[in-house]
Amino acid sequence: MAKKDALIMRGAELYDHAVNRPNPEQLAVVFAVGAALIMLATLLLSLGRIRLFARVLGILGVAAIMLAMFVIHEQTIRTKFGEYITVTRSRYPQPTRFQIRVALFGLPAAATLVLVWVQNSTRRRRRATVPHHLREGRKLMAQGAHQAALAEFNRALAISPYLADALYHAAAFTRPPDRLKKPWKISIRP
């Protein structure tokens, strides 16, 4: 049992050392790096470039900021008042620690709300392009550019898959140009 207690004490000492080691300047650097990663991720996402990499950068930025806040919340100062008396207290005052606790819970909640809002607005913006793709497909079909029309219809289907039946019926009732002897078929990819 004594060996298990010694391991627990050693783990507590390592945790205490790891949490209390960073000074305020180092924590400020971690905050700045986290903010820079988030801004870079936002820029890459807004440009539509390397989306997976941008998402990973954003997650790393939020994680860095949350790690720095957690370390600030957990840092302590030890003061010896004699040979046998050691007082351990928080490095930062209680109001600051309370604000950090609120931020530690609020940051993921705010990030989730922003992600949901961005996803919904992106979905609405993409759905707004469906009529343009359908109009362009019908125009190209009337001009005889069937492959280009099919590509436009497939773009519309990629955005709104529920349009498959409507596109099938639209293609069935569209007359082919007179120069074609047999009716053409449109293949719709889901």
Image (cartoon, grey):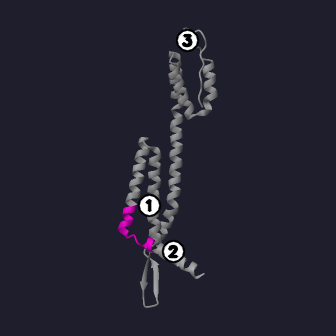
Residue 76 in picture, x, y percent from top left: 45, 76
Q: Which residue is mark 1?
A: 65
The answer to if 21 sits in the magenta stretch is yes
Point out the stretch of residues depicted in magenta.
17-30
Q: Which residue is mark 3?
A: 177
Point 45% across, 47% down: residue: 53
The answer to if 100 sits in the magenta stretch is no
Vertically, is 176 above or below 118? above
Q: Tell me the chief SS of the magenta region.
A: helix
Residue 11's disc number:
2
In the rendered image, is residue 134 in sight?
no
Q: Quarter-wise, where is residue 156 in the image?
A: top right
In the foreground, 41 or 13: 13
Relative horizontal placement of residue 19, taking residue 185 as reference (left or right): left
Q: Residue furthest front?
A: 3
Dot 1 amino acid type? Ile
Say which quadrant the N terminus sits in.
bottom right
In the foreground, 160 or 61: 61
Question: Label 2, label 1: how many angstroms apart (C-alpha)?
Answer: 25 Å
Vertically, is 138 above or below 104? above
Vertically, is 31 above or below 173? below
Q: Secondary structure at mark 2?
A: helix
Point 43% across, 73% down: residue: 20
Question: Label 2, label 3: how many angstroms apart (C-alpha)?
Answer: 80 Å
Point 47% across, 54% down: residue: 59
Say which quadrant the C terminus sits in.
top right
Residue 15's disc number:
none
Front label number (2 vs 1): 2
Circle nearer the N terminus (2, 1): 2
Residue 121 in picture, x, y percent from top left: 51, 42
Dot 2 amino acid type? Gly
